[in-house]
Image: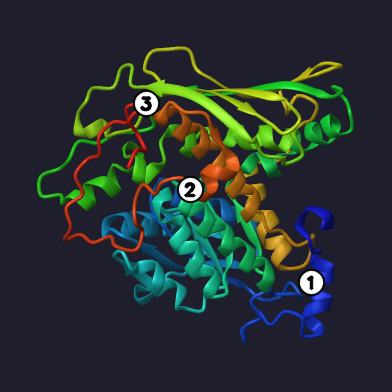
Amino acid sequence: MSEEKNGISRRNFTKSAALGGFAILSARGALAEANSDTLKVGLIGCGGRGGGAAMNHIRANENVVIVALADAFEDRLNDTRKRLADTNSPRLRKKVDIADDMCFVGLDAYKKLLATDVDVIIHATPPYARPQHIEAAVEAGKHIFTEKPVAVDAPGIRRFIAAAEKAKEKGLVFVTGTQRRHQKSYLETMAKIHDGAIGDILAMRCYWNGTLPFSHERKEGQSDLEYRLRNWYNQIWTCGDNIVEQHIHNLDVCNWVMNDEHPIKVTGTGGRAWKPNTEQYGDIFDHFVCDYEYPNGVHMYSSARHFNNSANAVFEEATGTKGVSRCQDMGKDDRDPYEQEHADLVASIRGEIDYINEGVRCANSTFTAILGRDAAYSGQELTWDDHLANGPAVYDPDTLSFDNAYPLGAIPVPGDWGKA
């Protein structure tokens, strides 16, 4: 990451810390500047992506150890603990040392993990929890890897941005799960695009057209909240809808093409074409089509859908005055990007590469998705500045309780959604 884009280089940060500019090193030496300290890592969110991210982390790095787990549900925590402990690789097994008293369960499990002496957190809960949990992680002085998207509504984006900016003030390294930003083929291609390989950008398009990742029927005895959290991909407030949870990857690349300028406005449409109107499939749409406009008049066509038995397409494309690029076609991969992002996290913590803080950038890409979703839900053209300031909340992260009722929301109806 460049000094210009991040505001401070890792080398300059080290110098400032030595002068007392940043007081973020714990007594345990959280930054491991000499590359000798073993970083203690805690995982918050022990589902499939969380367990996968933890494995990516220990495959990518030496002198790291997973020491703590937190999840709302004990069975998910136990499954991930077993998965990590039972790896066939001796090299990886030595990087897992999770004691019973470092396993935390419940809605407040993240607080208990953050109160330990872990240096780094991997955050992989469903998206609804991210602003609240990341805010707490920054307060606790932890370096952060967080999955995307980083919020599900405009208030959550504002809260997350404030946390990311505070992390920068503290010098905390902050990597987000937009792995294309760490993928060599994208990095090399984007450098050529920005150097004029396809000329001035005229238009873009991006697609995440695939099938529904999962949906579960409610099991006997599950409370509303337990079912909503276990079936999290199928409610707006837990997931953000597919345009936010998945399509953010493609939208992020389009923002990257535009040198991280974000769109200024969007119109969109969408709905439910095949999903039955049952609790299992929640209240989210199964397709979106959006037209985003950037400050210089460039338009980006966006398509995201979950259809069964239909053609799939996942890509980004930029058209310029000199040619067209699929945004990774002028480079070559040499490493799994899911591992590379964790390698970059630790390298930045140890001062081997420049300081990384991707929080605001990922928040902007997440809000690009939220803006398109809300334009489709409402049937209105939405502008960035107004909707970021005034867009509606879809849930209150500070009031969740297993004792409360969480009835399924109504499927949004364009023209009616968002009205007081």
Could you tell me if the residues under marks 2 and 3 are in contact, i.e. CB atoms within 8 Å?
no
Q: Depth check: give the residue in front, 65 or 352.
A: 352
Q: Is residue 147 visible?
A: yes
Please state if 215 lies on the left or on the right of 131 as rendered. left
Q: CA distance from mark 2 to mark 3?
A: 18 Å
> Which three-letter amino acid code belongs to the residue tagged 2?
Asn
- Crowding at dot 3, Cα within 10 Å, few <14 / some 14-19 / many 20+, comes out as some
**Residue type of the residue flagged with mark 3:** Pro
Q: Is residue 159 left or right of residue 180?
A: left
Q: Secondary structure at mark 3?
A: loop
Q: Which numbered marker is on residue 277? A: none
Q: CA distance from mark 1 to mark 2?
A: 36 Å
Which comes sooner in the sequence, label 1 or label 3? 1
Element type where label 2 sits in the image: helix
Q: Position of residue 339 (x, y in %)?
A: 62, 48
In the image, residue 305 sits, relative to residue 358, either above or below, namely above
Few, some or many residues within 10 Å of mark 1 (<14, 14–19, 20+): some
Image quadrant for the C terminus?
top left
Q: Residue 52: tell me if it is visible.
A: no
- Please, what secondary structure does the residue beneath circle 1 have? helix
How many numbered marks appear?
Answer: 3
Q: Amino acid at mark 1?
A: Phe
Q: Tag 2 or tag 1, which sits nearer the N-term?
A: 1
Determine whether label 1 and label 3 are within 8 Å by CB.
no
Disc 1 target residue:
13
Q: Position of residue 395 (x, y in %)?
A: 34, 51
Q: Residue at x 77, y 85 (%)?
A: 20
Residue picked out by circle 2: 390
Residue ID for mark 3: 414
Q: Earlier in the sequence, mark 2 or mark 3?
A: 2
